[in-house]
Amino acid sequence: MQYRVLGRTGITVSRLCFGALTIGPLQANLPLAEGVGVIRRALDAGVNFIDTAELYGTYPYIREALRDFGREVIVVSKCYAYTGQGMRESVEKALKMIDRDYIDIFMLHEQESILTIKGHWEAIEYLLKAREKGYVRAIGVSTHHVEGVLGAAAVPEIDVIHPLLNMAGIGIQGGTAHDMLQAVKKAFSAGKGIYAMKALGGGHLLSRSEEAFQYILSISELASVAVGMSSPDEVEYNTLLFSGQPVPPRLKSKIARQPRRLCIEEWCLGCGECVRRCMSEAISLSGGKAVANMAKCTLCGYCGSVCPEFCIKVI
């Protein structure tokens, strides 16, 4: 496994970051022991970086995976808080549930531009105080928006940016893959640590996964890439690719047969909460029910988090 320093933070991360969203209740909803086993498989293969968020519901998996693990593991989490009190509660929740004295990186989740970042400034001010006290080591933002990257690049207090980027531009808001890449380069020049998400476009690029990973790994400005993994096979496949080792044909075949999809159950009430939540504009209402445009869907599963009837799931 290769490692890089994340911007000016002094934090060294593996090129492959374990994206914890997929093991949790919004997606695979693995039993605790099974999910812990997947994380430990990645850690044993050299991954030292785990990406999660308060929304994902995966803190218990991470806590158990890190229990008695002998090497340093970098953990990043995120939340939507916009007040100092809300951010304090989210950071304290993460510390308690992961059973740690500090979180390496804490982020504002899904920022759209400099305007939304400024709108969350009270939360950032709390994170700055938490960084001074050692409760967090670095602060950042995650974003699907080109303007989100450019906005964060212009804010000296922000250490790390987590943008959506893939070779096809799937899920990128406010521009193309080229536009996002140029924004990433500008942010890197400003000293920001950058690690990407959705290199496979939410599963749309699974059939071209090696090409997609070659593209993302060729971007020198990226310290790491968060990839969702929910099985030992996926861990083996990704760690081999990110380590520059050949992938056995039998493993390629197994991974190619594991596409994910968004499932909307028939008992959907058509309330529209998922439509309002979807940043990719992939869900609409038709005939009083939610329907998904899979050409736009990034399979993040966030729509399921707001469904009052629990009828949306990534499977």
Image: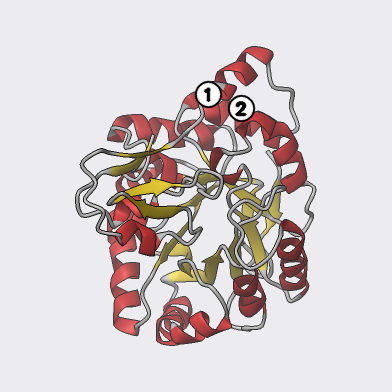
Quarter holding residue 209: top right
- Indicate which disc residue 237 carries: 2
Task: From the viewer's perspective, tell me whether residue 92 is left or right of residue 292.
Answer: left
> Dividing the image into 4 quarters, which one contains the C terminus?
top left
- Point 36% across, 74% down: residue: 81
Q: Position of residue 197 (x, y in %)?
A: 58, 52
SS category of the residue bearing label 1: helix
Q: Is residue 203 visible?
A: yes
- Point 34% across, 83% down: residue: 83
Q: Are marks 1 and 2 in contact (CB under 8 Å)?
A: yes
Q: CA distance from mark 1 to mark 2?
A: 6 Å
Q: Position of residue 242 (x, y in %)?
A: 69, 37
Vertical arrangement, residue 53 with respect to residue 254, above or below: below
Q: Is residue 100 visible?
A: no
> Dividing the image into 4 quarters, which one contains the N terminus?
top right
Residue carrying label 1 = 233
Quarter holding residue 143: bottom right
Vertical arrangement, residue 195 with respect to residue 233, above or below: below
Q: Report the front residue among 4 and 198.
A: 198
* Callout 2 crowding tier (Cα within 10 Å): few <14, some 14–19, many ≥20: some
Type of amino acid under label 2? Tyr
